[in-house]
Each structure stands twice: as C-alpha cells, then as structure tokens.
Amino acid sequence: MRAAAGGVVLGLGLLALAAVGFSQPQAQRSDRAVVSAELVVLNHATAEGHQQITLVDPRQRVLAVYQVDRASGALSLKSVRNVQWDLLIESFNSEKPTPREVHALTQQRP
C-alpha cells in the first residue's frame, strides 16, 4: 500500500514537471521526457494546438495519454492501454520485408 501511494505521488510529481512548459510562450516550448525507474513522462505539443502528456509505467506495461487544453488548463484522459500483449506481436501493420522475412534472409548461406 505504501509503495502504491509513493508511486502515485511520484507520478503526480512527474506530471507536474511535464506541465511546467505550459507557462512558457509557444515558441519556447519543446518536447520533453522525464524518466524514472517507475514512470516515463512524455510531453509535447500536438498539431491541433493541444498539449499531450503520455505516461508509461514500464513495470506494469501500461500507457496513458492525456490532453491539456491550453486555454483552460483542463486535463482529459484520452486513452489507457496495457501493452504487455502488444509487445509480444512479431509484426503488425508493417510493410515488407516483415521481421520473419528479414530473419529468413539472415539465415541463408552464401
């Protein structure tokens, strides 16, 4: 229980660090990444003019995406996904050569 509370506090702290860029003028903002053993926070501006914050929990293999409205500062959760099973897929929606084809090519003897 104590570790979970510590993780929440750390997550909120990293989220606050990622949000620091909101007070800077648009020209000075840049993509940011904050990485710890427990959480990865990615912060960047979208083409639509929003701020997007992505949290990755490497231990639980969960990804969460938030969008911040720059005018109001409202934070909305856009997506959450456990990627554990995704990472086991060898190939999905990829173009040729597929990983299997590349592997077969490397196994051929001259």
Image (cartoon, rainbow, N blue to C red):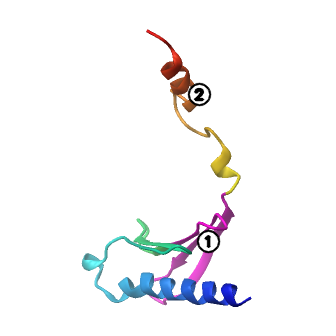
Q: Secondary structure at mark 2?
A: helix
Residue 29 in picture, x, y percent from top left: 31, 77
Residue found farthest to the top: 110
Label 2 sits on residue: 100
Q: Magenta segment, principal secondary structure?
A: strand
Label 2 environment density (alpha carbons within 10 Å; few <14, some 14–19, many ≥20): few
Displayed quadrant of residue 7:
bottom right
Residue 107 in picture, x, y percent from top left: 52, 19
Residue located 52% across and 73% down the image: 37
Boundaries of the magenta span: 54-83
The mark closer to the camera, 2 or 1, is 2
Q: Amino acid at mark 1?
A: Lys
Give me the disc on residue 78: 1
Vertical side of 107 occupied by 62: above or below: below
In the image, 12 versus 28, the foreground residue is: 12
Give me the disc on residue 101: none
Residue 3 in picture, x, y percent from top left: 67, 85
Residue located 63% across and 50% down the image: 87
In the image, 75 versus 38, the foreground residue is: 38
Displayed quadrant of residue 49:
bottom left
Label 1 environment density (alpha carbons within 10 Å; few <14, some 14–19, many ≥20): few
Vertical side of 21 occupied by 63: above or below: above
Residue located 28% across and 84% down the image: 25
**Quadrant placement of the C terminus:** top left
